[in-house]
Image (cartoon, rainbow, N blue to C red):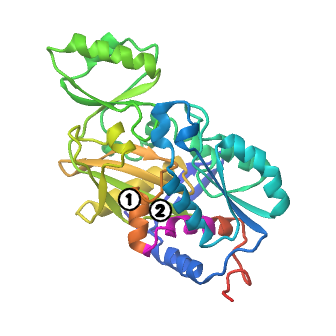
Amino acid sequence: MKDNQELSVLNAYGGRRKMSYNNNNERIFELYNLISKSKLLSDEYAVVFVYNEENLIDDEEHSSECITSVEKDMIINSFRKSALYVYATNGEDVFIEMLSEIKEKHKYIFIYSMAQNITGVGRRSFIPLLCNYYKLNNIGSDFFASTLGGDKELMYKLISSHVSNNIPFTIYVSKSTNLKKLIERLTPGIYILKPNDESASIGIMKIKISTSNIDYILKQLSVYQKKYSRFCIQEYIDGPEIEIPLLFYEQEYYCPGCVEIINSSPSGYLDYDTVKMDEYSFREYTGSLSTELINCSKKVACALRFETICRIDFRIRNNIPYIIDIGANPTISYHSSTNYIFRKRFNSEAAVYQLLLFIGLYNAELLKPPFNKPE
């Protein structure tokens, strides 16, 4: 792959644009050097963090997507390293109630959202949509990426022509799919069931299909189909799991490194309980496939037009990386592969949050003297 390789993709309005996937390390470190020397943003600026706490979520299953009080404090303190005014709102409704007051106090408002109030494909799209409507500066995933990121089937179809060799065998199931005929198409082996529009390992289940257990598997799938009307059946890739975070800046993607997931769960994958209890850890992956993993991830991000931060997850089998998940709005709190590798590169748990904020300032054309000069 050439260093300056670009990919032409359709933008949200039907036009075409060029996006490069150079590894712009130097510019990112220049930006972080600027961040470390900059004074706090004045009272013209405010950061609003929108989140969900577990105690306000009616659906217990989705509690794995909520943040703890420790995580909330860490995120607030991270933004406060750069901004004097940081607001935290527990849920979308509270954000709406506070918005008018915040707009009266501050000229420039930057939004970082992890919130959701519904289930389904568009469950994380409401805050990005409000940002578009009220012309607020969204430093997280935009409406396009947030919506697309909730539809596994659509994402895999959009990237298939770019990374066809890196997609595991997958069958997509809807509520009208004839499960008996579907099972007849599957060869014996181990598969992973995944809801089409969930994250944080919600609903993920491993099954083993053999000629002797077809009836049992059919019953399992029937129950699963009633709960998740759209899901996929994907071949289980038995091998190391590597996650690749990407940060978009100046029309290019920066990758801080590859992260291997250390998981001792008997299930052999990041199941719901393992994720909910944070019973896994990380180490940097520097193996022979590092460059291939990063380049493949950048192709995916380009094809899906992710323009803030994202994460592409792989499993490696027989020296081939297979894409097992795509995160358009990944968790970046302390116990995450993204924060782990940014922490390692910049020696600060706040680095990824500060970078998102300053990239937001840059995109809003607010990153200019005398603002960025220390006192």
10 Å crowding of disc 1: few (<14), some (14-19), many (20+): some
The image shows residue 368, relative to residue 64, as above or below, that is below
Q: Give the range drawn in magenta.
A: 346-359
Q: Can residue 371 be seen in this view?
A: yes
**Extreme-right residue of the structure:** 104
Q: Position of residue 314 (x, y in %)?
A: 32, 48
Q: Of residues 165 and 274, which is closer to you in this image? A: 274
Was residue 305 drawn as part of the magenta stretch in this picture? Answer: no
Q: Do the residues labelled 1 and 2 touch (CB within 8 Å)?
A: yes
Q: Residue 1 lies in what quarter of the image?
A: bottom left
Measure the C-alpha gap from mark 1 to mark 2: 8 Å
Q: Name the residue under label 1.
A: 295
The image shows residue 223, relative to residue 85, as above or below, that is above
Q: Of residues 269 and 287, which is closer to you in this image? A: 269
Q: Residue 97 lies in what quarter of the image?
A: top right
Q: Position of residue 208 (x, y in %)?
A: 21, 25
Q: In which quarter of the image is the C terminus?
A: bottom right
The image shows residue 78, relative to residue 241, as above or below, that is below
Residue type at numbered disc 1: Asn
Numbered disc 1: secondary structure: helix
Q: Which residue is drawn at 50% across and 56% down?
A: 71
Query: Quick one: label 1 or label 2, which is nearer the N terminus?
Result: 2
Residue type at numbered disc 2: Tyr
